[in-house]
Image (spheres, grey):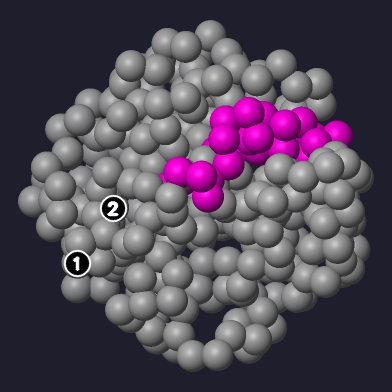
Amino acid sequence: MLIDNHNRKINYLRLAVTDRCNLRCNYCMPSEGINFAEKDSLFTIEELCKLSEIMVGQGIDKIRITGGEPFVRKDLMVLLRKLSTLEGLNDISITTNATLIGPYIQELKTLGIKNINVSLDAIDKNTFERITRRNQYDTVYNNLIRLIAEGFNVRVNFIALENQNTQDIIPILEVMKHYPVSVRFLEEMPFNGGSKSFNTITWDYKKILDHIQSEYSEITKLESPKTSTSINYKIKGHKGTFGLIPSFTRTFCGSCNRLRISATGDVITCLYGKPRMNLRDVMRGDNVESKIKEHILKAIGSRSKTGFEEQEKYDGIFENSMTSIGG
């Protein structure tokens, strides 16, 4: 079992398999993209399988596969097949933009992988294309509906972007009210490839809730797991739910149970901090299992208590793109 220096149990790993993405969302990276990692700097799929096995042996019982866009990797299913065999791994989840998932839906279902988060920051096609800078709306929407129809546990992640998509908050709830999905509204974070930095945001989780309450009068707050990052609600007459994720306000740090490992091996204990160490060369050396375990224990043994405490250690602005640190 992994316990950090604040007595928080760490059982959830967000594992990035690539830093590449086929969209160019304007809050994530510049239109020309970023300097993506060279192939030999990324974990191989065999290394990702081995790393996952070691982490599950240390007490990780939930792994979320992220990117970039995970399905950009042609060999992703090799890893997912391996994960499905690991004893003690109770939850395999994927975060995707749903552009490339279509051909794999049936096998994912066969493997028992049911939890899919779909990033969708607009229900209006023109707004979607303006944000993503790509003509992929129909593919994303059709794959989203397919995933719902096939019985996956689908959550839609919608980042509230000032002057860009907040007019879509009510419309996306109206479209999704017919389906058993959770629409989660995330606060914008200061990651934009170095092009944006801010200390406050207009559309925080309270304003998002006020906006939703101005349209729907009968809203019930739901009980959420202690480690949940979202504050969840039910609108009367809607099949699904909605959630608010205070990713900038950071109200959930006290119960944080997660660890991130980037596609190039960086161990990230907080989104607002710098990598603690890198595991790639360790994975390619001797005594891999014992050294990986040692490094992980060292990383979680020096975690900050909150994202604000971690942010204070940064000099200047956040220079990372979200796609390079696991979405």
Which stretch did the figure color magenta? 39-68
Vertical placement of residue 160 versus 207, above or below? above
Q: Is residue 183 visible?
A: no
Q: Position of residue 85 (x, y in %)?
A: 71, 16
Residue 149 in which image quadrant: top left
- Is 40 magenta? The answer is yes
**Residue sitting at the far left:** 126
For image coordinates 25% across by 66% down, the residue present is: 30
Residue 131 x/y as whole percent: 19, 58
Image-based side of 284 in relation to 287, left or right: left
Query: Could you tell me residue 119's position as x and y percent?
Result: 36, 45
Residue found at x 19% / y 73%:
163
| Residue 58 relative to residue 327: left or right | right
Other-residue count near label 1 (Cα within 10 Å), few / some / many at <14 / 14–19 / ≥20:
some
Q: Is residue 151 magenta?
A: no
Where the N terminus falls, by quadrant?
top right
Quadrant in the picture for residue 200: bottom left
Viewer-closest of 17 and 151? 17
Q: Is residue 282 above or below residue 164?
A: above
On screen, residue 253 versus residue 146, left or right, reads: right
- Residue at image position (63%, 28%) is 46
Instruction: Please provide percent x and percent y for residue 315.
Output: 55, 90
* SS label for mark 2: loop
Give 183 or 253, whichever is nearer the viewer. 253
Q: Which residue is mark 1?
A: 164
According to the picture, the residue beneath numbered tag 2 turns out to be 121
Secondary structure category for the residue under label 1: loop
Q: Are marks 1 and 2 in contact (CB under 8 Å)?
A: yes
Q: Quadrant of residue 93?
A: top right
Query: What residue type is disc 1 on?
Result: Gln
Report the number of discs: 2
